[in-house]
């Protein structure tokens, strides 16, 4: 059933992507083909938020690796709790596509009467409130961790993944997975049907640690994000080394202790982003984005895009389009429009360069958000979920693959 559904939905998922042409399944080779096989097997379909990365195989693998190991892999939190975090973070980031998809998936997993915060609710309102609060430094620090350390670390992995993914979706997808010609009265029933179609895959827990092997092993940065050093030192983005920790607790330590498969995934994805960022994002643009993120606390940038134009005007003329798009992606992805993308195209960027520019900027912002998410320190590494041994960071996941 799952394979048939995936094949039937392929044409519709491909046409949802704008600005770039995703690799078609029959044309997929090498790393792209490996990701597509895992994606259809574990997620149930070629999800547009993932396949939009396919012009860059490394960005595709990094996105899928983080998504799989945070949202899908078996752990100490349930899928409903993780879907609630994904929907809440997406709403905070003004990403209607992801908000709708994950709200409908949650609706299928949790009966409506229990999704509203009633007694015995598997998704307490403290979790969704905490997830929304991660969007800004001030609100994150006012919200206590909703669960014990290892479980909160899993939810923080989902939150950081969606702070990345929402930005890419806002750039490359429309507001809904439904075609715009669908009449208003039919949109809600069809959205619910889409959520029901995703339920079989959502109810299956994937074995942890299968996807990090798509990318080379890398050390987990500690902290795993670029931050503004308290002494005024420089912000460092993905792949540019480490900087002073900004939060009261180390989410890197929490991931390493409690969610090692995600720690490994995040390390590999970050290293890959550093490499393709150096390839496709001019050095001065990376410095500009880093400087803006260092001063950013998650707050809104304003109603217009003028702030990005003013900031990018500090760059050489040839790099200003890339600078504007990178800044908008990182700090106000809902403001990205066709004109911002076409300016970068006119400067010579192809599909791969466009994906890598925005992916690098989106991950830089997500890493900045990670710097202010408080996670209680774990006293010791918790045991792996029953039936799903978790590989240590850098360990070959094939050792734990099911026979």
Image (cartoon, rainbow, N blue to C red):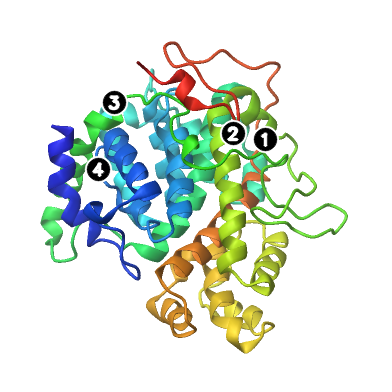
Q: Is residue 173 left or right of residue 242?
A: left
Q: Which numbered mark, 4 or 1, is in the foreground of this view?
A: 4
- Viewer-proximal residue, 154 or 40? 40
Q: Quadrant of residue 299?
A: bottom right
**Residues at discs 2 and 1 in contact (Cβ within 8 Å):** yes
Up-down relation of residue 103 to residue 390 (above or below): below
Give neighbour class at mark 3: few <14, some 14-19, many 20+ (Cα, 10 Å). some
Image quarter hosting the N terminus: top left
| Label 2 close to label 4 by CB (< 8 Å) | no
Relative vertical location of residue 346 with respect to residue 172 in this rendering, above or below: below
Mark 4–mark 1 Cα distance, whole angstroms, equals: 31 Å
First-in-chain label (3 vs 4): 4
Q: Marks 4 and 1: CB-CB under 8 Å?
A: no
Cα separation, mark 3 vs mark 4, equals 14 Å
Label 2 residue SS = helix
Residue sitting at x 62%, y 37% = 143
Q: Residues within 10 Å of mark 2 (few under 14, many from 20)?
A: many
Residue underneath mark 3: 203
Graded by Cα atoms within 10 Å as few (under 14), some (14 to 19) or many (20 or more), the crowding at tag 4 reads many
Mark 4 residue element: loop
Q: Which residue is mark 4?
A: 45
**Residue 403 in sight from this viewpoint:** yes
Q: Which residue is mark 2?
A: 263
Q: Residue at x 55, y 69 (%)?
A: 326
What secondary structure is marked by label 1? helix
Q: Is residue 241 left or right of residue 152?
A: right
């Amino acid at each position: 059933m799952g394979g048939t559904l995936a094949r039937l939905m392929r044409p519709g998922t491909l046409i949802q992507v704008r600005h770039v042409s995703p690799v078609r399944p029959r044309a997929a080779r090498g790393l792209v083909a490996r990701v597509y096989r895992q994606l259809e097997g574990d997620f149930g379909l070629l999800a547009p938020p993932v396949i939009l990365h396919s012009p860059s195989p490394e960005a595709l693998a990094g996105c899928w690796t983080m998504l799989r190991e945070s949202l899908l892999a078996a752990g100490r939190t349930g899928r409903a709790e993780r879907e609630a975090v994904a929907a809440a973070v997406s709403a905070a980031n003004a990403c209607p596509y992801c908000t709708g998809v994950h709200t409908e998936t949650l609706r299928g997993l949790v009966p409506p009467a229990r999704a509203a915060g009633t007694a015995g609710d598997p998704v307490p309102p403290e979790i969704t409130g905490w997830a929304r609060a991660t969007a800004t430094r001030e609100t994150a620090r006012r919200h206590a961790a909703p669960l014990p350390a290892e479980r909160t670390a899993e939810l923080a992995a989902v939150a950081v993944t969606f702070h990345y993914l929402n930005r890419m979706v806002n750039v490359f997808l429309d507001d809904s997975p439904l075609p715009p010609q669908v009449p208003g009265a039919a949109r809600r029933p069809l959205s619910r049907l889409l959520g029901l179609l995703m339920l079989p895959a959502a109810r299956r827990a994937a074995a942890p640690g299968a996807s990090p092997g798509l990318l080379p092993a890398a050390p987990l940065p500690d902290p795993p994000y670029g931050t503004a050093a308290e002494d005024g030192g420089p912000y460092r983005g993905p792949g540019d080394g480490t900087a002073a920790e900004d939060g009261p607790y180390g989410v890197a330590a929490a991931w390493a202790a409690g969610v090692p498969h995600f720690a490994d995934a995040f390390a590999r994805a970050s290293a890959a982003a550093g490499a393709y960022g150096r390839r496709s994002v001019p050095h001065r643009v990376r410095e500009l984005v880093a400087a803006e993120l260092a001063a950013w606390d998650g707050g809104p940038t304003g109603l217009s895009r003028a702030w990005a134009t003013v900031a990018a005007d500090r760059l050489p003329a040839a790099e200003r389009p890339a600078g504007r798009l990178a800044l908008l992606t990182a700090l106000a992805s809902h403001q990205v429009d066709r004109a911002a993308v076409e300016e970068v195209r006119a400067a010579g960027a192809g599909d791969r360069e466009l994906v890598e520019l925005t992916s690098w900027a989106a991950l830089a912002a997500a890493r900045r958000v990670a710097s202010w998410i408080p996670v209680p320190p774990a006293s010791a590494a918790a045991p792996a979920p029953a039936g799903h041994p978790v590989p240590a960071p850098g360990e070959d996941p094939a050792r734990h693959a099911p026979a």
